[in-house]
Image: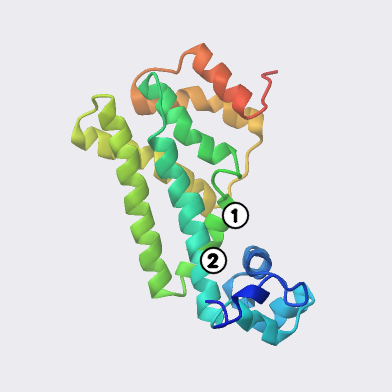
Amino acid sequence: MAHPNKQNDLENPARGTADAWLEGAFELFLESGIDSVRILPLAKKLGQSRTSFYWFFQDREALLDALVGRWREKNTGSIVRQAGAYADSLQEAVLNVTDCWFDQAIFDARLEFAMRSWALQSAPIAAEIETADAQRIAAIADMFRRFGVIDLTADVCSRGLYLIQIGYISMQISEDTGTRMKRLPEYVRLLTQHPPLQKEMDRFHARHGYVPG
């Protein structure tokens, strides 16, 4: 919340901007975890006075709420949008969701890991994670149902598509792009009973700037 009656001065360079404070908090969160997101260290990082913070946020809790809002919009919002995106086939629909796992501009895996780490020490954040997981799985299950997959199978397939990736993130497994691309058609086949068409894989490769060796 901005300081009352000071809306016209929110862009004062001596105080920074709300986005700058939030971005700085976001960087601290990813680098060192939630305990590092404190007003004084953040002010020093940004070269601002501690009091400048209060022109944009009521207190630290308001800043943390904004961090959660950014995660909710970017990661949960992106999965829901990708699951609802147009596709000619179920295989292409699965690839649309898989864009999230290959493009950090769509889905931020580092942010996801940081949020899940925070949830280990915060019951309210654990509840946020539980809600997000349910929303994401439901959106992916609806995607499978659009292509005629029955309810229980749609639920199981959506969990497979989503939870495998969350496992990768939680375990911090790193694989090179070539290995991931080579395995991807088989993942799609396991989840949909058919491999993607070559033209569907070609479009996926092009979206992610990948040229098969």
Number of marks drawn: 2
Q: Nearer the viewer, residue 56 or 68?
A: 56
What is the three-letter code of the residue carrying label 1?
Arg
Q: Is residue 94 left or right of residue 205?
A: left
Q: Note whether residue 38 is visible.
A: no
Q: Which residue is mark 1?
A: 110
145 relative to 22, above or below: above
Name the residue at 34% across, 59% down.
Answer: 131
Q: Nearer the viewer, residue 6 or 149?
A: 6
What is the three-letter code of the residue carrying label 2?
Leu
Q: Is residue 8 left or right of residue 198?
A: right
Q: Position of residue 201 (x, y in %)?
A: 53, 19
114 relative to 102, above or below: below
State the SS at label 2: helix
Question: Residue 36: which disc?
Answer: none
Q: Which residue is mark 2?
A: 67
Q: Where on the picture, by quarter, is residue 29?
A: bottom right
Name the residue at 46% across, 57% down.
Answer: 72
Q: Quadrant of the C terminus?
A: top right
Q: Position of residue 105 (x, y in %)?
A: 60, 44
Q: CA distance from mark 2 to mark 1?
A: 13 Å
Q: Where on the picture, by quarter, is residue 37?
A: bottom right
Q: Position of residue 42 (x, y in %)?
A: 70, 76
